[in-house]
Image (tube, helix red, strand yellow):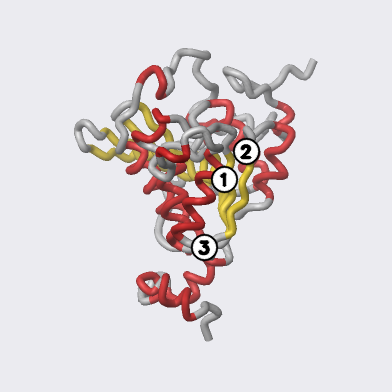
Amino acid sequence: MSGLTPEQLDRYSRHVIMDDVGPDGQEALVEASVLVVGAGGLGSPVLQYLGAAGVGQIGVVDDDVVERSNLQRQVIHETDDIGEPKVESAAAFLDAINPNVTVDTYQERVVVDTVEELVADYDIVVDASDNFPTRFLLNDACTLADIPLVHGSIYRFDGQATTFTGGEPCYRCLFPEAPPAGAVPDCATAGVLGVLPGTIGAIQATETVKLLLDHGEPLDGRLLVYDAAGMNFETVTLAANPDCPVCGSDPSIESVHDVEYVDSCTVADSA
């Protein structure tokens, strides 16, 4: 007997009639929890589709407010939201699209002192951030806690996505260190195609739902690279680095407090 209410059976009927989802799969989504770090370009489609899919508890982390320049790509925010915290705008959007979803808002940056407690409350973490220190911090915290991490990033016409389900490889196998500060321009200086985060964010949402349903093959060990200008997708195999400081055979990172998450995100000097 399904535990879904008549309203939920109606709302999620296109899931329920699928053999690969069904009532049990939809119940799994309703009972799941996902933390989305970033309520901007990538976070917008992630939040939109996870909310519509019925993920029962969604955490939204962002310390920024809505600006007019965000509206070209951050589609969960509106003109009337300018000046409002992005987490509040995101929560209002999710409530409008699906009032069954519980939304936890965190108007703050993800930092060393809070990240472990923050990610521990959720089944999956989605990295929709826009900076390397946050990406490395989420990777290390999730790897150490064995929590799946769904990553996405965008730049001009290019995007990439991958999923780390725990163990190896991890984000540090892909990028051992962050590039020097200022070496990679952000959206404010380099620009980004407005529809690009919609594609990559939808892929991140797809990966998240697949993990919650335990169905299909996630991008674990694979990096999906998207060239919007040429409309090409390429899949690159990610090899685990046996010397990785967090997931390798002899890890030097046993806590997020072992790392200085500024610029290079390197292991802190023990001296």
> Whole-percent x and y of residue 256?
70, 32
* Mark 3 and mark 1: Cα distance apart in space: 16 Å
Is 11 drawn above or below residue 126 in the view shown? below
> Whole-percent x and y of residue 167?
58, 45
* Mark 2 and mark 1: Cα distance apart in space: 8 Å
Frontmost of labels 3 and 1 is 3
Evaluate if marks 3 and 1 touch, with contact meaning CB atoms under 8 Å apart. Answer: no
Q: Which residue is label 3 attached to?
A: 99
Evaluate if marks 2 and 1 touch, with contact meaning CB atoms under 8 Å apart. Answer: no
Residue 52 falls in which quadrant of the image?
bottom left
Q: Assess disc 2: are there few (<14), some (14-19) or many (≥20) residues with their C-alpha within 10 Å of its C-alpha.
A: some
Q: Which residue is label 1 attached to?
A: 60
Q: Assess disc 3: are there few (<14), some (14-19) or many (≥20) residues with their C-alpha within 10 Å of its C-alpha.
A: some
Q: Assess disc 1: are there few (<14), some (14-19) or many (≥20) residues with their C-alpha within 10 Å of its C-alpha.
A: many
Three-letter code for the amino acid on which mark 2 is drawn: Gln
Secondary structure state at the residue bearing disc 3: loop
Secondary structure state at the residue bearing disc 2: loop
The front one of 67 and 183 is 67
Q: Which residue is label 2 attached to?
A: 107
